[in-house]
Image: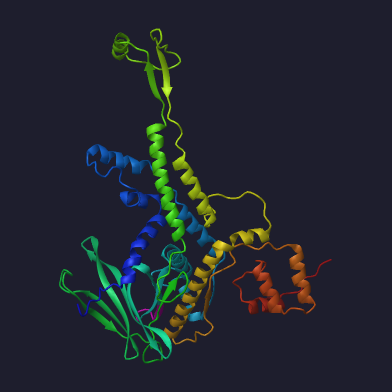
Amino acid sequence: MKHDITFIRPEHKQASIHWETMRDVCAGAEIVKSKRNKYLPFLDPTDESERNKRRNQDYIKRAVFYNITGNTKIGLIGMAFRKDPTVSIPDKLEYLKTNADGAGTSIYQQSQATLESVLEVGRHGLYVDYSDDSNEAMILVYKAEDIINWRTKRINGKDKLVLVVLREVVEEPEDYGFKDITQYRELAIEDNKFICRVWRRAGENNSGQFEISSTYLPKPKGCEHWDEIPFTFVGAQSNDPTIDDSPLSSLIEINLGHYRNSADYEDSLFFCGQVQPAISGLDEGWRDHLEQNGVKIGSRTPLMLPQGGSFIYAQAQPNSLAKEGMDDKRNYMVALGARLIEQNSSVKTATQANGDQTASTSVLGICCSNISEAYTTALRWCAQYLGLNGDDVTYTINQEFISKVADAGMITAIVSSWQSGAIRDKDMIRAMQKIDIIDPSADPELVKQELKDAEPQFTG
């Protein structure tokens, strides 16, 4: 179709297959098990009997999915947000700290959700819109699955977004309930001007073709139009339109392999884990006697057998292959950064701890840096909407994932250097902020002024 707003880029279609798996694994056991044979093989697919179907149901039910990936993701988010992000914005944008999207979500909570999505699938999107009713700019987030189309164009030696299509689902009231309506938001540059269109299905029952429902031309205060689309991608490697790999993709793959090994191991325990009584040396008379009167097993019930008869417990030999496979994958996951699975209780120096964290925090650091850059850009667009100067606007997520231990010698050295004039007041304050002696989010200039204004303290 010539005007098919629902067109999805081929690379998006391909990535969506993997995104679903990544979301499922990060969501945990309930979601993974609900997908049934998507993640576990169907045993004996040639047998379509009810008995085999029940066996496969029990096979899935007994399997144990360890939410290693999800716990690792939560741990990484906790490391990034162990300190509040630092934000520098004009007073007129202070409302964004508590209501960034117009729905009551703070910018801190929103950036946490953004990091979560980037860790899961390696992609997210931020769009800055403006509400005429409240005269406020807002930051809207879009999952990777809903950014279905985009296009760039080389302008003045720089690749520039000229088209973004976002899929949205809105609720419409229906009696006491509601129904979900899918619509598409087109963000485009036409004649060097930004234009926004909303496409919805035609007809009373929303059953017709998609057509333009509304069109508007947002503009910053004091300007005739935007010359760029106020939308930015957020990626695991960079914030360009290229689809990045998930930082957790390797861990997710091994986690699913661990799940399959667990299913085989639990199935083996069920069928072979219990002992099987066996009686030998019986003639037909004894056999019929025992079948008629039954056999009771236990230390208080003697079992009478004929001469030469014997009673044993048949026990299967341990099948350790599945268990060994689980242990191997568990070690792989530890090596990939799943430290919540097994904590090393040995005492380490701060240098050793920092070295152990390098592999995992480097990936996390890139993600946090990209998100900080994206939110800084979004906040500057918010400032432009209100006609404010956004040059000094910043949003920075903490990248010191391990707390630094401040010993007395370090503090003494910093203070001595400051007192001797070797470092400036601002340098001393920033050094103290890095070791959490002074609030890291505090403005060094304000701290400096407070120290000057403080009343002298007399001791002795």
Q: Nearer the viewer, residue 10 or 173?
A: 10
| Image spot of residue 92 (x, y percent) | 48, 81
Q: Nearer the viewer, residue 324 or 333?
A: 324
Q: Would you say the magenta stretch is mainly helix, strand or loop?
A: loop
* Left or right position of 10 against 398: left
> Which image quadrant is residue 350 in?
bottom right
| Image spot of residue 146 (x, y percent) | 33, 69
In the rendered structure, does residue 134 fall within the stretch colored magenta? yes
| Image spot of residue 57 (x, y percent) | 30, 42
The residue under the point 29% across, 68% down is 169
> Which image quadrant is residue 110 in?
bottom left
Q: Nearer the viewer, residue 425 or 454?
A: 425
In the rendered structure, does residue 30 fall within the stretch colored magenta? no
The relative height of residue 314 versus residue 263 in the rendered view (above or below) is above
What colour scheme does the image use? rainbow
The residue under the point 50% across, 46% down is 327
* Left or right position of 76 against 209: right
| Image spot of residue 227 (x, y percent) | 38, 88
Residue bounds of the magenta highlight: 132-137
